[in-house]
Image (cartoon, rainbow, N blue to C red):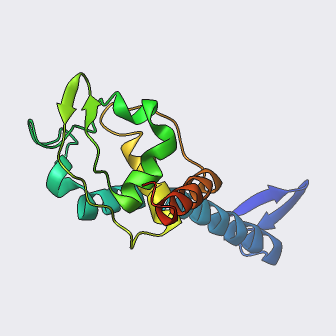
Amino acid sequence: MPKTWFYNHEVTLSHPVIRANIFFNTFLLTAIIGLSACEPNTFQEGERLYKAQCANCHMDDGIGLSALIPPIAGSDYLPANRDILPCIIRYGLKDTIVVNGKTYAEIMPGVAKLTDVQITNLLNFINNSWGNQNGLYRLEEVQATLEECRLQVQRGER
């Protein structure tokens, strides 16, 4: 059996302390590699939601649909209207808007079934994809905005 030095003592690799040390180090290295390989895409859930709920109109690459549906990719509307984007996703949009200098009047239906967490994930994906660099939403921010929207809807203001 091969021999090695352990704290100034010559021991064989079959020595219990050496075997335990080798096992532990191997386990630790495997766990670290495994965890880093399993690290999910930060925006994976938001991307999945986008493809399921938004891509039919705004297209997979966020460029919109010509004169009918505004682009999300490179949109000046997103950072300028950060405070109402959660409301638009949940309750839709019936107003005329201007995106990148172009006017759009199509009605956008809301997606009421999305949870606050899902809306946060969706917004984080949209705001940080296709060249957009509009920062991240916190769940608390989205929840506060949605609560204000809910009250506006109840009062008939939205």
> Dividing the image into 4 quarters, which one contains the C terminus?
bottom left
The image position of residue 54, as x and y in percent, is: 25, 56
Query: Is any part of residue 42 visible from this angle?
Result: no
Determine which quarter of the picture holds residue 9.
bottom right
The answer to whether residue 35 is left or right of residue 62 is: right
Residue at figure coordinates x 69%, y 67% from the top left: 22
Residue nearest the observer in this picture, 111 or 129: 111
Above or below residue 9? Residue 138 is above
The image position of residue 109, as x and y in percent, is: 26, 60
Query: Is any part of residue 145 visible from this angle?
Result: yes
Above or below residue 75? Residue 114 is below
The image position of residue 106, as x and y in percent, is: 17, 47
Above or below residue 146? Residue 17 is below
Toward the front, the furthest residue is 156
The image position of residue 51, as x and y in percent, is: 25, 59
Determine which quarter of the picture holds residue 24.
bottom right
Residue at figure coordinates x 27%, y 30% from the top left: 98
The answer to whether residue 73 is left or right of residue 118 is: left
Residue at figure coordinates x 29%, y 36% from the top left: 130
Toward the top, the furthest residue is 101
Residue at figure coordinates x 50%, y 66% from the top left: 154
